[in-house]
Structures are given as C-alpha cells and as structure tokens.
Amino acid sequence: MWENCLQVIKSNVSEQQYKTWFEPIVFESYTPATMTILVQVPSPFVYEYLEENFVDLISKVLKRFFGSSVRLTYRVVTDKTNDGTVVMESDNTEDKIEKPLPRTRANQSYTVLDAAQPQEIDSQLNPHQTFDNFVEGISNKLPRAVGLSIAEHPSTTQFNPMFIYGPSGCGKTHLINAIGVKVKSLYPQKRVLYVSARLFQVQYTNAVRYNTVNDFISFYQTIDVLLVDDIQEWMTATKTQDTFFHIFDHLFRNGKRIILACDRPPVDLQGMNDRLLTRFSCGLIAELERPDKQLCIDILNAKIAHDGFDIPEDVVEYVAENACSSVRDLEGVVNSLLAYSVVYNRPIDMSLAVSVLKRSVKVDNHPLTIDEIVETVCRHYQVSPEEVSGKSRKRNLVVARQVSMFLAQKHTKMAASRIGKLIAGRDHSTVLHSCEKVEERMKVDKSFCEDITKIENSFKLKK
C-alpha cells in the first residue's frame, strides 16, 4: 500500500521534487489497531518541508489506500552520529475543525469579526515562532526577558502596553508571536490575537463599507492579549488611528494586554495621533537592535542543530560576518545551503557558502556604524569625536556635528532619536534640524557639497 501511495505521489510532483523529498523517506511500520503509519525522514529540515509543502497531497493519498482515519507519524533523525531520533505526528490540515464564523452583509460569507458574543477565535499565531527558538543575545536581552515575563503573567498591568521597535529583520515579529504562543499555552482560555497593522486597516475599511464598524470595534474589545505588528503603517491613516484609539482605551482600562511592534520609536511616528503616542509611551518602550556577530553565530548554530545538518565552523563564521544585517538573511542563507546540499548531494563547505551568499546578500558590504561615520567626519574636519559629542557651539564643531547626524540618517536605518543620543546626547528634533540645515547648505554651497561627497567616498573606501 505504501508503494502504491508513492506511485500516486510521483505522478503529482516533478521528478526533482520526488527524488529530493520522497525517495529519502523510509517506511517503518503500519499499526492497524490505531491506523498509524510510521515513516523515517533524514532530518528535521526534510520533515518541515514535507509538512509545509506536501501535507495535503500526502494526506489525500494515504486516505485513499489506508482509509479515512489513517494517521501519519514521522521518525525524524536529529543526530546522525549517535542515531538520535524523535517521533513527530503529521499536521493533517483536513482534520482541522472549521469553526463557524459570522457573516458579513456584503456577501454572506464568514469572517472573524463577530462581536455579538465571544466565540472561539483563531489567534493567527505562528506556532513555530516561540521563546525556545528565539536565541538570546545582548541586542535582544531586555525585550526577550520582559516579553517572557508578560507571557507568564498576562494579567498584571506592569509594562502595559509593551512597545517593541527596531529595524526590519531583527526579530520583532518572532518575539510578539512568541509572547502570544506562550500565553496561549499557559492560559488556553485567554483570547489572544495577532494581527498586522495592514490587515487591521483592511478589516476596518471593509467594516466602514458594510456599515459594521460597531461590530468591528466590539470584537477587538473582547481580546485579552492583542498583538499588533508594523504599526508604522498607520502613520497617514487618521481614521484607522481614531478607531484603534477606542479599542486601545477599552482594553487598557480593563487590564487587557497590548503588545505593539514598529520599525521606529513612538517619537519618530510622524503623523500619528498625539493621544495614541502618549498611550504608546506609558508602558515599556523596548528596542531590538541588529544582531551582533556572536548572536548571529548562536542563531546559526541553533538552526543547524534543529535541522540536523553538519556545517563547519569556518562556514558558520563566514555566514555570520556577511549576512548579519538581519535574522531573516541568516535564515535564508542557511535554508539555501541546506536545499543545495540536499538537491545536489554535496557537502556544505566554504565554496558552497560563497556561491550561495553571492546570490543572497551583498558580501563585504557591512552597514556603517555611527562610530565609523563620526570618526570619518571628525578626520575630515580635524576635530575629535569627544569635541563633537560635547556642548561647544564653535562653528567647526557644530558643522561636524550636523554633518555626522545627516550622514547617519542617510546611511543607517537608525531612528532619529537613537542617532541623536549616540552622537551628542541630543533628541530627535536636533537630528531633524541638523539634516535640514545640511540639505539647505548643500543646495547653495558647492565646496560644502564637495566635502560631503569626499566623506561619503571615504565610507566606500573603508568598505
């Protein structure tokens, strides 16, 4: 029966897909009493790929030959050296119970937005993004520790709301998902919901169109733990902000948890409603910084251990040095290395790593740091970094200070408040003012414009 299943699968996938993902599967046993099939796969990477891409096909084929109640389990090899394995059950999507949801007036189809009574809802959480695989480092220690504390004690009012900010790819979405997953595992009765700011805005727009705004607001007011991602999307959406304000106020006054993620701190959310900004700032504002090299190495080693592959230390260090701009880059490179290794049956070595990184990231193009920018500017104007960060208003120091802020704003993805703090202990308004002054002078002062160009060329030479 298993061979018959493979023949049907083979006719529904490409030859390369079959050879890569299905030929390595080893049939172990079938238990008629429990209608359970046990198969072995060579690594967690293969197991996850099958479950994410072929679970529907596998399920339909197995039910055709083994019966509708058949269950598929995997023996996953996790340690080839010591023959370590773990048994995992297939996530059969066809067996999931579809919960009835309320109908909209527009097309009488179902939607999650039902406010009449708190029914069971889909939390929209990613179950794979947990605290267990959120690797801790210096750049994320505080947000991770506070997030875990909130997840373990969601009914306390301390650090509410929690506002997490940082550049793209530093782990914000993973962290807020981990909070939600932990809450749901410890307190199953809690109504937890993850939603992106863009989806929230689309839902609100539809509610306005179909005259169901009150139901929309009432639904969100029933949530116990609300996790909203990428709220910078609302900076120009005034009506969405007003609606979220009413939801936020209700949840906050009733002791419900609100976790927000953004690519910048509240002070840099230009166009956001002042009354919202004050509420965003009344809890905890936690920054997630870009991962340093050691954290990148730790993340890579954790993923390698999870996927059951052997990658040499020099390759790990090379990837950590050249794909360190974001966690997503790291994961993408490792996934590519694993895929190339599986498909072409070749070891993961330095030559393969160099080849993959050329296609994935810009090698040897590290983002500039604030220190590098300040040092280069100071060298050009023949002043010291200590003088630039001081209080002196001498003209040459003011110019060096303003140029440093302008170039930091241009060549890094840091928020203005962070730039001001690092360069001279100033606030975000000083940075914005400095940028305006530099831009205005560049339009009328040719020699000043040439100075800026020389400094930027120095950056390129350093790279």
Image: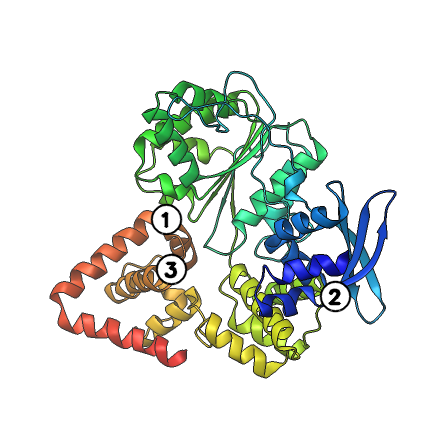
Which amino acid type is shown beneath numbered disc 1?
Asp
Asked if the residue under mark 2 is in contact with the one under mark 3, i.e. CB atoms within 8 Å, the reply is: no
How far apart are the two marked residues, 3 and 2, measured between alpha carbons? 60 Å
How far apart are the two marked residues, 1 and 2, measured between alpha carbons? 54 Å
Secondary structure found at label 1: loop
Q: Is residue 270 in view? A: yes
Q: Is residue 90 in view? A: no
Mark found first going from the N terminus, 3 or 2? 2
Secondary structure found at label 3: loop
Q: Residues within 10 Å of mark 2 (few under 14, many from 20)?
A: many
Q: Position of residue 38 (x, y in %)?
A: 81, 54
Tell me which corner region of the image, top left, top right, bottom left or bottom right, holds residue 191. top right
Q: Residues within 10 Å of mark 3 (few under 14, many from 20)?
A: some
Q: Nearer the viewer, mark 3 or mark 2?
A: 2
Answer with left or right where residue 243 lies relative to residue 323.
left
Q: What residue is drawn where x is 74% and y is 66%?
A: 42
Q: Which residue is mark 1?
A: 427
Tell me which corner region of the image, top left, top right, bottom left or bottom right, holds residue 225. top right
> Closer to the camera, 124 or 36?
36
Q: Which residue is mark 2?
A: 42
Which amino acid type is shown beneath numbered disc 2?
Pro
How far apart are the two marked residues, 1 and 3, measured between alpha carbons? 14 Å
Q: Which residue is mark 3?
A: 390
- As drawn, the label of residue 323 is none
> Closer to the camera, 5 or 183?
5
